[in-house]
Amino acid sequence: MKRPLTRSAKIQLGLLVLLMLAVAWGVLRALDRRSTQAASAAAAAQSLQTVPTYQLGPRDVLPVVLADLEVTVPVSGSLEAVQTAAIKARVAGEVQGLRLREGDAVKAGDEVARIDSTEAQARVRQAEQQAASAQAQVAIARRNQDNNQALVKQGFISPTALDTSTANLEAAEANHRAALAALDIARKGLADTRLRSPITGLVSARPVQDGERVGVDARVLEVVDLSAFEVEVTVAPSAAAPLKPGQPALLQIEGLPDPVKATVARINPSVQAGSRSVLVYLRVPAVQGMRQGLFAQGHVVTGRTRVAAVPLNSVRNDRPQPYVQVVRDGAVVHQTLPEGLTGLLEREPMRATPELTPGTPVLSVTAGLIRDGTPVRLPQP
């Protein structure tokens, strides 16, 4: 006969049953969570394999247009004054009278400074005395020559003595000429102590101070003439082929609100050894606010042509070769562009794309970069 369970045994049995139920519930929850995670992973993998279709906006697409382009060659460079002068010391010594500073105006021929002329003046006085002494020797030799000629005619001296006096006169005259040449050199040295500006312009640099001792060829002042400017630009040989002197150009100069008209002045006949580029010089008229060294960017107009083209900002350059994003059969295709012309259409920069048919949809700069082959939907017309 079985004994009835005690109260404590019943409590222990109930706790055991509850524990078993809790374990079973936890196992079921874990299995359910695993199945949910597996389903999520499968859905994520499926979504990764499925390429999304992009809906393009009206501003993201533009067609290739057939337009009359103003063919241009892009150029950029720095403004340089046509006339600049570096005033250097021709003799060594102490700089005196240097009062001009950067921005001061100076005229051609104005004395801008001088070098201490104490030694130069002394050399001039020395050369003058030597020239006077040589002239006196010439006078003595000439009197002897005249006397000897009279004595030879009277038969008192031989012709040999006359030849000797003639040679002495010629030597005295040669010494006098040499003394005069030395005097000219001394006067030239004295004149070189006064520094004068060769051009009219503005002082752009003052490397030395008044009272400073300088050597020969030391820069004392630099003067810039702001009445005419040039821009030296480098272009590729293929782009330089259509360029000719006299062609018009339009430049946007740093700090100036309006573009400035320029002209092709010269083209270097040689190609630069390192960069394999051609130097082209543009003549720019002076405009209020221009300064030497300002950056200029623009284009040279070389002609007109009718060709299929797209806006220049839609051409991407994040690869070795430029390309455009074309929409074909509902997907984006990266179309590589060979080297081509650039031009203007109503002042908008354009890129000639003769390999594209007019009307072909091309992604604009607002669309950004979309992977090649991505499906897209064009906006409704």
Image: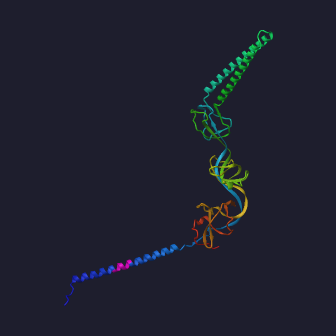
- The foreground one among 168 and 312 is 168
| Left-right relation of 41 to 359 | left
Inspect the magenta stretch and tell me whether residue 230 lies in it.
no
Picture quarter with the C terminus:
bottom right
- The foreground one among 164 and 202 is 164
Most extreme residue toward the bottom is: 1
Residue 311, image x, y percentages:
65, 63
Q: Is residue 302 above or below residue 153?
A: below
Inspect the magenta stretch and tell me whether residue 27 lies in it.
yes
Residue 204, image x, y percentages:
62, 41
Q: How many marks?
A: 0
**Residue 256 seen from this side:** no
Find residue 322 and report its image quarter.
Answer: bottom right
Q: Is residue 66 above or below residue 186?
A: below
Picture quarter with the N terminus:
bottom left
Where does the magenta region start and end?
24-30
Q: Is residue 113 above or below residue 321?
A: above
Q: Residue at x 30, y 81 (%)?
A: 18
Q: Residue at x 64, y 51 (%)?
A: 77
**Residue 189 seen from this side:** yes
What kind of colouring is applied to the model shown?
Answer: rainbow
Most extreme residue toward the right is: 153
Find residue 31 and report its image quarter.
Answer: bottom left
Residue 226, image x, y percentages:
67, 44
Find residue 339 and report its image quarter.
Answer: bottom right
> Magenta span: helix, strand or loop, mainly?
helix
Q: Residue at x 35, y 80 (%)?
A: 25
Residue 42, image x, y percentages:
47, 76
Q: Residue at x 49, y 74 (%)?
A: 45
